[in-house]
Amino acid sequence: MNAQTQAFTLAGGAGVIECKLDLPQDAPPRGIAIVAHPHPLYGGTMDNKVVQTLARAFVALGYASARMNFRGVGQSQGAHDAGRGETDDMALLVEHMVARYPGLPVALSGFSFGTFVQSLLQQRLAGEGRPAERLVLVGCAAGKWELAPVPVDTILIHGEEDDTIPLKDVLDWARPQDIPVLVVPGADHFFHRKLHHIKQWVIDLWRR
């Protein structure tokens, strides 16, 4: 991300969790953003370009933006747990950030498999009476995994030519929830040469 990116670790259920934090430079954070990466068994890491784009968007909005490597990725210990352990670990990251920046709202965002994890985490937080302020889901994993329902103000961004998660599957999942889907024309699953659309849409829609 930048020279100010802070690396830190947490103690998770399967061992060490490797994390990174980026902060706004000109003022104290006005919120906390937690970003989740794509599938760890297919090369997904917290340094994925879509994940970093989401982190940059939230930093531009004044949020402290934290991300982690899921189990078995980078320096994070443990093995892939099909979303269960990953959700537990992400909840630990939320707790760490809330303790570090008490009183700030928490936003959840993710890319691909990370959208599945964040939908489960939002469901958990809502059940505890403290739902996230808002969600941003990019390359939503609908049809691949059983996502939990998400709030109607969730920002859904998908590539028109995504051949990993077809746009039709996302529309079929979003339709009964009455959630609009923002489609990037010509974009593939990884938004090659289209990342600027993600950042700009997140910033513009959040400020509204």
Image (cartoon, helix red, strand yellow):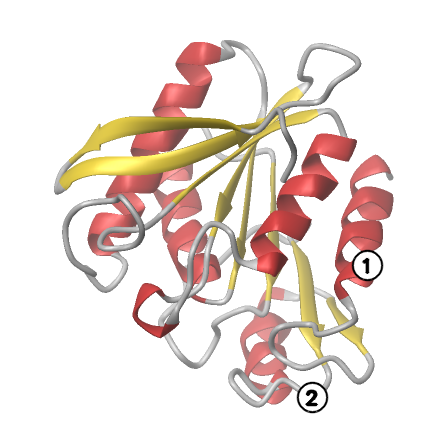
Where residue 145 appears, x then y in whole percent? 36, 73
Q: CA distance from mark 2 to mark 1?
A: 17 Å
Residue beneath label 2, please? 161
Per the rendering, the mark at residue 40 is none
Q: Residue 93 vs residue 158: left or right?
A: left
> How many other residues sit within 10 Å of disc 1, few (<14), some (14-19) or many (≥20)?
few
Verify CB contact (< 8 Å) between mark 2 and mark 1. Answer: no
Q: Residue at x 69, y 10 (%)?
A: 28
Q: Residue at x 24, y 51 (%)?
A: 71
Whether residue 128 is visible to the viewer of this picture, yes or no, is no
Mark 1 lies on a secondary structure that is helix
Whether residue 196 is visible to the viewer of this picture, yes or no, is yes
Amino acid type of the residue tagged 1 in the rendering: His
Where residue 191 appears, x then y in whole percent? 69, 72
Where residue 176 appears, x then y in whole percent? 58, 72
Mark 2 lies on a secondary structure that is loop
Indicate the quadrant where residue 160 lies: bottom right
Q: Residue 165 vs residue 143: left or right?
A: right
Residue beneath label 1, please? 196
| Mark sitting earlier along the chain (2/1) | 2
| Above or below: residue 5 compared with residue 140 | above
Q: Residue at x 71, y 74 (%)?
A: 192
Between residues 147 and 113, which one lies in front from this camera angle? 113
Q: Residue 7 vs residue 168: left or right?
A: left
